[in-house]
Each structure stands twice: as C-alpha cells, then as structure tokens.
Image (spheres, helix red, strand yellow):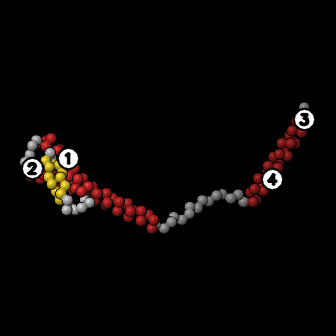
Amino acid sequence: MPEVPIQIGGRTFNVACQEGEEHFLHSAAALLDNEAKSLMDQIGRLPESRMLLMAGLMLADKHAGGEDQLKSLEDKVAQQEAWIEELQSRPKPEPERREVAVIPNEVSESMAELAARAEALAEAAEEKLRAVG
C-alpha cells in the first residue's frame, strides 16, 4: 500500500491508500485543503486537529446540501415521469367533428335559374338602351 504525501492547510500528511487510487486521494485532499485554506483566511492559524475538524465539517455540510438538492431533483424527476406516464396512458382524444353547411341541390338549381334570369333581364335592358340611344 503506497503512502502518499498530501498538503492540507499548509501541513503535509502521509496517507496510505490502495494501489491505483492515488488520484482519488489527491482529489479528496484538494477539497479538504480548499476548506482548510478558507478557514485559515477567516480565522488564522488553528491547531491541526481543529483545522481538520472544521474543514471536514464544512465539506460535510456542502455534501449534505448537495444530497438535499439531489433528493429534491430526483423527486421532481419522479413527478415529471409520473405525469408523462399518466399523459401517455390517457386514451387518444376523439377526432373533432366539424359540420360544414351543405347546400341542397334544389337550392343550387334555383340559384342558377335566378342568375340566368338576371342575366337575361340585363341583356334585354342593354338591347333596349342601344335601340333608344
């Protein structure tokens, strides 16, 4: 098991880890170091155990907030999935019927006859005007 030196709050610690997991240890140490630096900027120099405790608590608080947010988002996704499922399980709506007025043949024929008579009257009136004028 390799021992890896890590820096947290300006202090070096040798930590053992599984072979091949050194990258994960460095990533975790960097997170803890950021919190420790933040503490030291706010408070100043702290005893090692207090610095590590406070930095760990700050990380745990961020982690808990992230878990709460994740849970909230998972609940929201579950609600959306349930809503989609409900919408997909609904029966398809019936096609909407539109009624269009249909003019009966008798009315069409009567209208055509009236139009023909009107044209004939107009023609007769024009002929009389030409004869007089």
Kind of residue indicated by mark 4: Glu
SS for tag 4? helix
Mark 4 or mark 1, whichever is nearer to me: 1
Q: Mark 4, mark 2: which one is toward the viewer?
A: 2
Marks 3/1: CA–CA distance: 107 Å
Q: Which residue is drawn at 19% across and 55% down?
A: 4
Q: Do we see residue 62 in this rendering?
A: no
Q: Can residue 53 be seen in this view?
A: yes
Q: Which mark is residue 13?
A: none
Which amino acid does the dot numbered 2 rest on?
Glu
Q: Nearer the viewer, mark 3 or mark 2?
A: 2
At 24% from the left and 61% from the top, the residue drawn is 19
Q: Residue 34 carries which label?
A: 1
- Nearer-the-camera pick, 42 or 108: 42
CA separation in Å, label 4 and label 1: 96 Å
- Disc 1 secondary structure class: helix
Q: Which residue lies furthest to the top in this view?
A: 133
Inter-mark Cα distance, 4 to 3: 26 Å
Residue type beneath disc 3 = Arg
Which residue is at 20% across, 52% downward? 29
Q: Earlier in the sequence, mark 2 or mark 1?
A: 1
Q: Name the residue under label 3.
A: 130
Label of residue 113 in the image: 4
Relative placement, left or right, of 49 versus 114 is left
Kind of residue at badge 1: Asn
